[in-house]
Structures are given as C-alpha cells and as structure tokens.
Image (tube, rainbow, N blue to C red):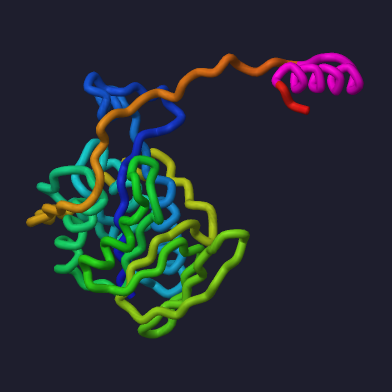
Amino acid sequence: MNIIVPIKQVPDLVEELEINADGTDLDREWLKMKLNEFDDHALEEALLMKDESGANVTAIALDGDDIDKALYAAAAKGADRLVKVTGATGNSTHQAAKALANAIQGMDYDLVMTGVQSVDDRDGQLAVILAHYLGNSHVSVVTGVQASGGSVTVQKEYGAGMVAEFEAATPVVLGIQAARETPRYVPVAKVRRAQKSSTIEEVAAGDAAADAGSTVSKMYKPETGAGAEMIDGSAEDQAAKVIEILTQKGVK
C-alpha cells in the first residue's frame, strides 16, 4: 500500500506573534515555524500502518520557509520518499489543494492522509478539497485506520464523543484528527543523518489557480481586559465577596 502524507509548517503559537504593517498577516520576518500538529498525527498514522503491513510512505509539502527541515524530519521518523511541490503561489486552502493534487496525480497511491486542519487556515477543508481535485472519496475527522486488501476501515469522530466506523475503497483521502498513538519523537541527530542520506524530489505545482476561498481584510490583536480580581479569605468571606460583586453588577 502506498500512502501520501501532505505536511506543512505553521506558526508556533507559543511564540509572541506580531501583526505586519498593513494588518493582513503575521509579521513573518522572525516568525518561528513548526510542523502542523494534525499533519504530525497523519504522518504517525501512516507510519503505524507501515510498521503493521510494510506500507510505503511519501511525505509531500508545498515549497516554503523551513519546509526542507520538516521533510527531513519526516524521513528521520520513517517516511520512504520526500517530495517538494515548487512554484505554488497564494496561501488559500483551495490553491494548496490544487497544487498538491497536480503533484499527487502523477504518483501511485492508495491513501492520502492529511491533517484535518491547521492553525493558519480559515476553513479546515484541505482534505475534502484535495479529494475533489483528485476525484476520490473522502472521510474526515479520522481517529484510526486499518487497511484490508483494496479498502480501509476508518473510525470517524463526531460530537459528544460519538465514533462511527466506515469502510472505504481505495484510493481515498482521509483527514486525520488524531493518530492511534502519540506522534513519535525524532532527535536532531537523526534528522541530520536524514539530511545526508535522503533526497527531496521536486515536482512543479502546475496550474494551481483557484478563485474560491477567502481573503483577510484586517487582523487585530485581542482587546486586553481589566484582568482578574483574586479573592482571599475564608470560604465564607469569598462567598460574601462574590455576592457583593454580582450585586454591584445588577445580578439578582
């Protein structure tokens, strides 16, 4: 079985984020990037399937800042093939999906497993749009995958903890919510060895123009409130103070 896993770098939300001068994006000059959490889970699920049945795993990514590092890290974790899609412009989900689909259509694959969303997209629809451009079926919010012959059985998560099981014929695109196990850690030394032993193939994005999607008109930092008031004293004193505050605010 051949599995393709699209991955991307996203802003590290632990860092202090600044908005650029025209207010339409983050200031990316010193922005620290990291592998999208959900893509990491998609890669882990693919590698678990490789461990179980000898699947071949390809990590693919659109060209961008630090993306080579992310691809080499995927190789260090166990990916068999690395592909970078060059020449893609724009950053909408539709454009990314079309560029990835153009590259993937020339490959032999059974599964495409991508993260169900990322912190820097506005719709969380990469998997379903990618399935559209590839002409494949699609299941998203997946928390487990088992392969059997020419089909896969997937667990799909719904609200309130409900989980449904689906059987899908391959090829199919899956949006991974969580892998069955925590994504494996890879030490820096192993990534450096992968840089020396692995090759990143480059594939042209082709025509990735897409009119659909949304654009950002303006970004703002959240307004800062007055802060929290800490209430000290015994439980009775604290209860009395809470009642006093609520009464002052007109709560009866």
Residue at point 25%, 59% (across, down):
81
Magenta stretch prevailing secondary structure: helix
Determine if residue 82 is in view.
Answer: yes
Q: Which residue does the image show at 33% across and 75% down from the upper left?
A: 1
Q: What is the total number of numbered labels drawn onto the structure image?
A: 0
Is residue 109 shown above or below 117?
below
Q: Is residue 199 visible?
A: no
Question: Is residue 237 found inside the magenta-colored segment of the image?
Answer: yes
Residue at 36% x, 63% y is 113
Q: Nearer the viewer, residue 221 or 142?
A: 221
Give coordinates of residue 147: x percent, y percent.
43, 77
Q: Residue lying farthest bottom?
A: 149
From what the image shows, is residue 217 above or below residue 147? above
- The image shows residue 33 at horizontal and vertical percentages of 34, 34
- Residue 168 falls inside the magenta stretch: no
Does residue 91 lie above or below 116 as drawn?
above
Q: For residue 99, which quarter of the picture?
A: bottom left
User: Which residues are drawn in magenta?
Assistant: 231-249
**Rendered residue at 78%/28% (across/down):** 252
Is residue 23 rendered to the left or right of residue 17? left
Name the image quarter holding residue 159.
bottom right
Q: Position of residue 177 (x, y in %)?
A: 47, 57
Residue 182 on image: x %, y %:
53, 53
Indicate left or right for 28 with 45 as reference.
left
Examine the image and state in which quarter residue 79 appears: bottom left
